[in-house]
Amino acid sequence: MGKNKLVLVDGNSIAYRAFFALPLLNNDKGVYTNAVYGFTQMLLKILEDEKPSHMLVAFDAGKTTFRHKTFGEYKGGRQKTPPELSEQFPFIRQLLDAFKIKRYELENYEADDIIGTLASSAADGNWDVKVFTGDKDLLQLVTPDVEVVLTRKGITEVEAYTVEQVNERYGITPDQIIDMKGLMGDPSDNIPGVPGVGEKTAIKLIKEYGSVEKVLESIDQISGAKLKERLTENKDQALMSKELATITKEAPIELGLEDTNYEGYENSSVFPLFKELGFQSLLERLGGDEELLPETEKEELNFQMVSSIDAEMLQNPSALIVETLTEDYHKADIQGYAISNNNGTYYISSSLAKGSNEFKEWLEDNNQKKRMFDAKRAHVALKRQGIQLNGIEFDSQLASYLLNPSESLDEVADVAKQYGKLTVDSNEKVYGKGAKKKLPEEDILAEHLSRKAHAIFILTDLLADKLKENEQSNLFYDLEMPLSLVLAKMEEIGVKVKADTLREMGTDLEAQLSMLEKDIHELAGVSFNINSPKQLGEILFEKLNLPAIKKTKTGYSTSVDVLEKLEGKHEIINKILIYRQLGKLRSTYIEGLLKVVHEDTGRIHTRFNQVLAQTGRLSSIDPNLQNIPIRLEAGRKIRHAFVPSQPGWKILAADYSQIELRVLAHISQDENLMEAFQSEMDVHTKTAMDVFHVNQDEVTSEMRRRAKAVNFGIVYGISDYGLSQSLGITRKEAGEFIKSYLESFPGVQQYMKDSIAEAKQNGYVSTLLHRRRYLPEINSRNFNLRSFAERTAMNTPIQGTAADIIKKAMVDMDKRLSDENLEAKMLLTVHDELIFEAPEQEIEKLKEIVCEVMEQAVQLDVPLKVDVSWGDSWYEAK
DNA sequence: GCCCTCACGC
DNA sequence: GACGTACGTGAGGGCG
């Protein structure tokens, strides 16, 4: 017989976590629901992941407990539970009842004690127990049969602790947790401990002596006069603290393990409560699971599977679906079409479409307007069938991205669900996923595509109105829509890559790597997989006994910053660093790129994702051509392989100089920063002068390096912690740099304040061209979430405006190239850089045009500056 | 198939 | 005082 699975939940703790992790949501009746919502998410996750046979949620009861007899001030000074949370507890109880989950509370005892008692009574070997809580104190309950799962961040991100993991994290056994607390105390429960003893000292002492009692017996042997004195003076307090921290396993509870038996819940009792609370998304989440809910009625849609194509279908305007199943549309076949317009909705099979010249002409007719979803995909797929798609009036994927970039809207179903009433099944539901993905029967396909087409036809007006309301119509029609076609063109052209050059570099790397591997294995005295952080960590920190500087949640960290700190301590380190660097080049850039070079043309066709990045930037996949190495020479050589596609042509690269800082100068109107750009100063030197209060000729290279990192931080919105990491200094020092920076650039400081205020006021921040990013967490009472939202509020207008500018330059540039009848082709964009190929005789002209177009893309109050270079490869164009 | 760590670019 | 900290994509290992 299998073991019983008992899940015990610390109800108060999880409710608190949920409350502080989520913004203060309320439902349409004005009742706060954030804690209930978070609690529900956690419950669903537990039921799904753990599938418990037994389950119970324990709550604290009343204000005083048996511990108050020991120590009257126990939990003293603790802030009162916010009323916004208190009022949610009745709903949490209702929720548990609806889920048919047992709940329990006991006068004079805390939830911990109920959990401790039940967990210990389940120690007969027939039970697997999991305890869910946000309170680290409960780690004392861990045994080989009992795991404690702590919430990490948000609600549903958790970390399970076994005996080994407690030991790994604290270096002590679970039952020594109470000894640790006895010495260090716990401010949140007002447990005093021994003054002056914190976590580090407590662990050290417990590791050495085993328990509080043993420590107190051995005070004489302990080094440090001050510590001795404190331990001596606070003996009783230490013992009492340990007692307070100890969870009882003998609470007089009136229910036994069998009473916690869990048999699942019924939608009929859960759904009405969800509805009352306004948990629409959870309703849908459960509703989407066919096992839990009978199929929801889809509204009727009249569509025709047509056998011939005629004018009735080819209306202006129409919604058009060009269906592809393969993710990479450069390779995808078209599986079928659907058209929806005022006359009706029609499914057209791909074979029928292929034979119809009328249909082809309609697709290519710029005057026949098409409403679409991801038009770039259709454009590229059709191009390979010899069809030039024209007349794209509206791309609802782009529109919904502009309306809210944080919604991930990968397919028509997502947008339909969010904005419309018409039900569209997800592609996964219709086609399956992974290895099982396949075309359904044709009538199913026909209905699916028809529903998509119909949804798009209806959604277009709705989305267009919303864009107008947001003053985003220009952004949509004049920037993102034309840009999608420019990107389609760039992707279709592709960039020529010399596979032979890559292969030669690969052979060379191979030789170096095998030598390094041999050396590393010899130095380690054993053969192991250097690419495995786990094995590498064991070799470095256990076998070779090097000091472990940092841990990840799964083991030792072996990242670059850790290894760099160990350089000089052992010969092996440097070799590992080089091995890593070269290994990355081999796998990601040599092998990775070779895999995607098109056999016939020798070109690489990336895909730019125009609807993903929260800031408005583009991203690039399959392959990512926006992270080709440049910083280190060994990697930079990869760029030798990127060459013009025709003899006599050159590669030309144009990049904006300091575009983000120029944008910052413009937005903030900071006089000091504007002056720096107007006088064409080196901005990092200028920053160093102001931050370190020195003259230009006193700026050392170290000062400039630090100033550059500060500017980097400003541009990317990193925290003092982030800056401290990148400079290898303390967080305090990093904080002081930032402070000094903001004093030197008061306009910037004011901008930062204003931007946060704007986000609080409107709920979003925006860029020069009205791109938006919503920041609901800006008002969160969770420090982390709020801080993150604040940094985002400061940073997104800067990065997003820079993205606006280069996108505008791309659209303008595409037009200029054709107006001037140049053969030059735009190939790539890397955030602040555009890459072209052109016949050598066009280079001079191209340089001139590129500079003009990029620098004049928008008018700022500081000049935009572009650096251009060209050569026989991307490497030479530096 | 999914998660984690690591590493590359801006 | 907590907590984990710019945005992306991709490779490899290790687990189920």
Image: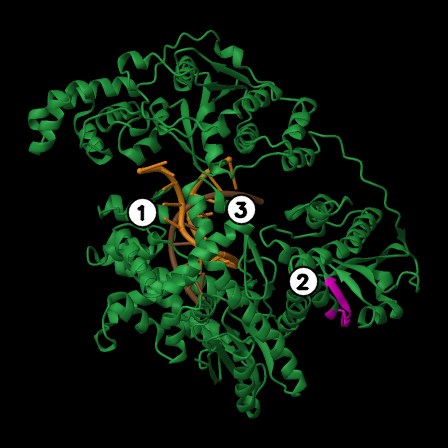
Chain colours: A green, B brown, C orange
Q: Which residues are magenta?
A: A383-394
Q: What's the residue type where badge 2 is placed?
A: Tyr
> From the viewer's perspective, is residue A103 above or below residue A846?
above
> From the viewer's perspective, is residue A633 above or below residue A645?
above
Relative depth, front residue between A399 and A595: A399
Disc 1: which chain?
A
Residue at 48% across, 52% down: A757
Q: What's the residue type where badge 3 is placed?
A: Pro
Q: Magenta: predominant secondary structure element?
A: loop
Q: Which mark is residue A455?
A: none
Relative depth, front residue between A20 and A133: A20
| Quadrant in the picture for residue A734 | bottom left
Q: CA distance from mark 1 to mark 2?
A: 41 Å
Residue at 71% across, 63% down: A375
| Quadrant in the picture for residue A477 | bottom right
Check the image and name the residue furthest to the bottom. A841
Instruction: Provide the residue designation for mark 1.
Output: A537
For numbered disc 2, what is the local secondary structure? loop
Residues at badges 3 and 2 in contact (C-beta under 8 Å)? no
Relative depth, front residue between A495 and A487: A487
Q: Which mark is residue A776?
A: 3
**Labels 3 and 2 positioned on one and the same chain:** yes
Disc 3: which chain?
A
Q: Is disc 2 surrounded by few (<14), some (14 to 19) or many (20+) residues within 10 Å? A: some
Residues at badges 3 and 1 in contact (C-beta under 8 Å)? no
